[in-house]
Image (cartoon, grey):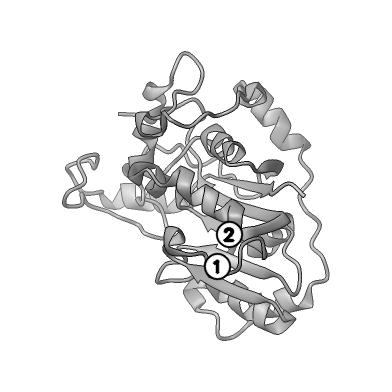
Amino acid sequence: MRLIALALTAALALPAAAAAQTLPALPSLDETPAQRAARRAAMTPPVPQEDMALQAALASPTRPAADVARDVYRRPFETLTFWGLMPGSTIIEIEPGRAGWWRNILEPYAAATGGTYVPVSRPLEGMGVADGSADMVVVARAFHNWHRAGRTEPYLAAFFKALKPGGVLAIEQHRSVDGLNPDQTAPTGYMPESYVIRAALAAGFVLDARSELNANPKDDRDHPYGVWTLPPTRVAAPREGNANDRPTPLTDAERAAFDAVGESDRMTLRFRKPA
């Protein structure tokens, strides 16, 4: 069933698990497709700076070849420039995972510029820095998991506490069609952009900027095994215990078509803790 069939006829419906949150109204996000296309066209991409340490981290021969191959989809230099990465920063990455795609860039960059890289897998057990001392908290592709586990609100509160005034919350997330119910999109790996923004605003952050750097118009989000159908995961058959998966494997033609889509359509957001 196509996710678009889940679209709500009213404003974004918040999930029952998060009903206790008071999320501010955000009418500016209720865009028509034409308004969204116009906003994207009017956006000016960030201008790459002469950050030689970041260039060196990206070009390092120690970076895994599989990581480098994904640069065309994840645009690390442009994305980190948009987020405002600065030499000497204290950077916290939330749930970097075993592959450590961002870690393989951020950790050597921090070391080379006199900064600090802190990987945090369990934010509620500690953020690894003193309160109010972090310059940036990076969250990549995690909100769908937190929503399903009821962790969004406490995690955002922990990030807010760790950041210094003016510090950046940097978010990259698979993006669903806006106006869908997060309860129904989260199992597919996608989340509405308005949901993520409202949750961050409710935690006290200020929305500093939105970017279409990592948008992918080829991604219609209608995949038999959720976002994991696409590269780099490339699931090709139903997974045990995943009730939402199609019961049949991909044909060779379907596999080739999903590979041609590339990686997911993603929101790229920059929030700040008020000074």
Camera-side mark, 2 or 1: 2
Report how far apart the C-alphas of labels 2 and 1 lie in the structure.
9 Å
The crowd level at tag 1 (other Cα within 10 Å; few <14, some 14-19, many 20+) is some
Question: Going by the image, does 121 lie left or right of 199?
Answer: left
Query: Going by the image, does 157 lie left or right of 231?
Result: right
Q: Quadrant of residue 133?
A: bottom right
Query: Which residue appears farthest toward the front when viewing the image?
Result: 131
Q: Position of residue 221 (x, y in %)?
A: 42, 38
On the image, the x and y values in percent for residue 256 come to: 37, 52
Do we see residue 59 in this rendering? no
How far across and down, in percent of the image, does residue 140 sit?
52, 56
Q: Does any portion of residue 93 appear in the rendered image?
A: yes
Tell me how many marks there are: 2
Answer above or below: position of 186 versus 155.
above
Residue 6 vs residue 218, the one in the foreground: 6
- Mark 2: which secondary structure? strand
Residue 138 marker:
2
Left or right for 170, reference 18: right
The answer to whether the residue labelled 2 contacts the one labelled 1, judged by CB atoms less than 8 Å apart, is yes
Tell which of 95 and 8 is nearer to you: 95
- Is 145 positioned to the left or the right of 270 in the image? left
Residue type marked 2? Val
Q: Which label sits on residue 240?
A: none
| Amino acid at circle 1 | Trp
Can you give x and y, in whole percent of width and height, for residue 39 in the image? 72, 32
Mark 2 burial class by Cα count in 10 Å: few <14, some 14-19, many 20+: many
Residue at 51% across, 70% down? 119
Q: Which residue is mark 1?
A: 102
**Pointer 2 or 1: first along the chain:** 1
